[in-house]
């Protein structure tokens, strides 16, 4: 019974964050940037990036934006050490909310948000998780790198049912 409560709470929290992000993003009206305001990266042909992340997991990962960042879809993957279970791999499919705001964090950058679903596999005790990542990407306009943060509620399916949260922050360098 305790396990079912944990799963239920994890699902409710995930749905709350997804609904909150959807509501906030639906209120945003798309606007065309003026000729003096650049809201996109200088070189959008570089849509594959690799980098590192730290949080509940530590490792390296990558992100691929489909159709040179014109479509709202991307994938991300990573491998590294999970402090709760040893070596792990994860892969996610993401829906991107483009150009939420232009920020000046050391340099002009576009803020993007994402939400999606994926899978994580831990190899020490062979755990399998379903992930629901929700996060933000800060992509610099004049440089091919970006920062990201992410919260990913998860439901463990194997060897027994449970739940947890992955939290990570990192950087990526876009080169292809």
Image: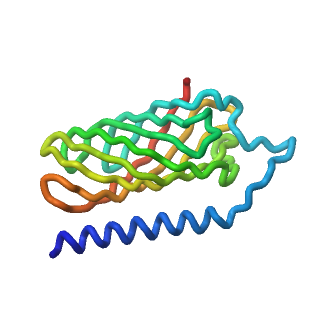
User: In x, y percent, where is residue 59?
Assistant: 34, 37
Residue 100 in the figure: left or right of residue 66: right
Q: Residue at x 69, y 62 (%)?
A: 28
Colour scheme of the rendered structure: rainbow
Q: How many tags in the picture?
A: 0
Examine the rendered structure and indicate whether residue 8 appears above or below residue 81: below
Q: What is the residue that sits farthest to the top in this orientation?
A: 176
User: In x, y percent, where is residue 58?
Assistant: 32, 41
User: In x, y percent, where is residue 44?
Assistant: 65, 32
Q: Residue at x 63, y 46 (%)?
A: 105
Q: What is the residue that sits farthest to the right in this orientation?
A: 35
Q: Residue at x 77, y 41 (%)?
A: 38
The N terminus lies in quadrant: bottom left
User: In x, y percent, where is residue 26?
Assistant: 64, 64
Image quarter of residue 164: bottom left
* Nearer to us in this view, 164 or 96: 96
Q: Residue at x 55, y 24 (%)?
A: 175
Residue 61 in the figure: left or right of residue 100: left
Residue 140 in the figure: left or right of residue 9: right
The C terminus lies in quadrant: top right
Examine the rendered structure and indicate whether residue 7 appears above or below residue 120: below
Image quarter of residue 13: bottom left
């Amino acid at each position: 019974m305790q396990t079912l409560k944990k799963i239920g709470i994890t699902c409710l929290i995930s749905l709350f964050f997804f609904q909150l992000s959807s509501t906030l993003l639906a209120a945003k009206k798309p606007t065309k940037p003026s000729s003096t305001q650049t809201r996109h990266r200088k070189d959008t042909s570089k849509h594959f990036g690799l980098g590192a992340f730290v949080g509940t997991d530590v490792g390296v990962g990558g992100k691929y934006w489909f159709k040179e960042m014109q479509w709202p879809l991307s994938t991300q993957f990573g491998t590294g050490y999970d402090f709760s279970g040893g070596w792990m791999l994860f892969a996610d499919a993401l829906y991107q909310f483009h150009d939420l705001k232009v920020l000046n964090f050391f340099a002009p950058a576009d803020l993007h948000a994402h939400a999606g679903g994926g899978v994580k596999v831990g190899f020490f005790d062979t755990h399998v998780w379903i992930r629901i990542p929700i996060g933000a990407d800060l992509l610099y306009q004049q440089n091919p790198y970006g920062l990201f943060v992410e919260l990913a509620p998860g439901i463990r399916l194997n060897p027994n049912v449970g739940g947890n949260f992955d939290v990570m922050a990192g950087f990526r360098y876009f080169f292809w």
